Amino acid sequence: MKKYDLYLESGPKHRTTMVHVLDLLGCTASGPTTEAALAATPGAIRAHLRLLQRHGERVRPDTSFTTAVAAHVTEGSWIGYGDPAPGFPPDFEPLSADELRTHLRRLSWIHEDLLELLGDVPARRLTAKSAKGRSLAEIVSHIAEAHAAYLRYAAGNFTELSDAMKALRRGDTPPVEALRRLWSVSHTRLDAMTEDERARRIPHGQATWTARRCLRRMLEHDWEHLREISARLGTSTQYLGTTNPSGGPGG
């Protein structure tokens, strides 16, 4: 039976907890308490496996599995929201070329699904404020800004990235098209990472970044907002687990 190791981060008194399933990079579950986040985790795992299955991977979302807590970060600032400063031990392992290809392929599937969800949304609805908070256009902008930040941590700044972000911020093109452009730039740059870049450790503030850590956050963050946007549009439940349909606070 498959066992998934879980890596947890919790704010004070184990509130605002996020679970990271690093064996299924990109899969997370969140909750207002550790208990709630752990209860949401099986549903999140199955939802993520359904994503992979829809795109052709030979996985079995309905098969039985077990979980075990491998690490639990409870100290530091801004924990419980996806990116504890210490990171997790697997974050610092070199990334092989095969792993990179696998993660980029899965990231492209998340992006395809996000673009499909957003593609037919009228401009007026994209910019309309929601009782739940940000407009869809603001969520798209947030997704882009976070994705670009993770890419810079892994690969530094470069002209194509700067140009893509300037276009998005200026509003030269519709936000969904600007997001598509950014992701194309990102995929091309990540796909070209050298062996040295895939093993490099890069200090930035309180955190040390690696290619693996950056890809983890890209996958997790874009997956969280795929689930959020799906729930907001009410068009599909295929991305949702049994609880916490918005995918948690996520940032």
Image (cartoon, rainbow, N blue to C red):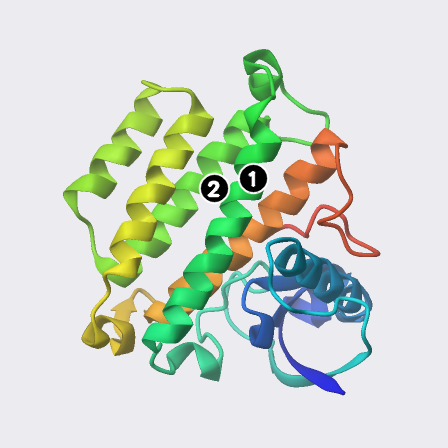
Q: Secondary structure at mark 2?
A: helix
Residue receiving disc 1: 114
Q: Work out whether 173 lies above or below 22.
A: above
Residue appearing at x 54%, y 14% in the figure: 123
Q: In the depicted view, which residue is nearer to us: 130 or 67?
A: 67
Labels 1, 2: front one = 1
Residue at 32% x, 49% y is: 186
Asked if the residue at tag 2 contacts the one at tag 1, i.e. Cβ–Cβ closer than 8 Å, the answer is yes
Residue denoted by label 2 = 143
Quadrant of the rendered structure where residue 15 is?
bottom right
Percent from the top left, x then y, of residue 11? 63, 66
The residue that appears at 34% across and 43% down in the rendered structure is 184
Give the farthest residue toward the left. 159
Q: Position of residue 244 (x, y in %)?
A: 78, 52
In x, y percent, where is residue 235? 75, 32
Q: Up-down: is 51 above or below 33?
A: above
Q: From the viewer's perspective, is 126 left or right of 163?
A: right
- Tag 1: amino acid: Leu
Name the mark on residue 83: none
Q: Residue at x 20, y 40 (%)?
A: 160
Within 10 angstroms of label 2, few (less than 14), some, or many (20 or more) residues? some
Quarter of the image where one finds residue 124: top right
Q: How far apart are the two marked residues, 1 and 2, measured between alpha carbons? A: 11 Å
Q: Secondary structure at mark 1?
A: helix
Q: Quadrant of the N terminus?
A: bottom right
Q: Residues within 10 Å of mark 1 (few under 14, many from 20)?
A: many
Q: Amino acid at mark 2?
A: Ile
Position of residue 192 relative to residue 185, above or below, is below
Query: Which quadrant of the view contains residue 117?
Result: top right
Question: Which of disc 2 and disc 1 is earlier in sequence?
Answer: 1
Is residue 32 at all visible to an observer of this figure?
A: yes
Vertical arrangement, residue 74 with respect to residue 55, above or below: below
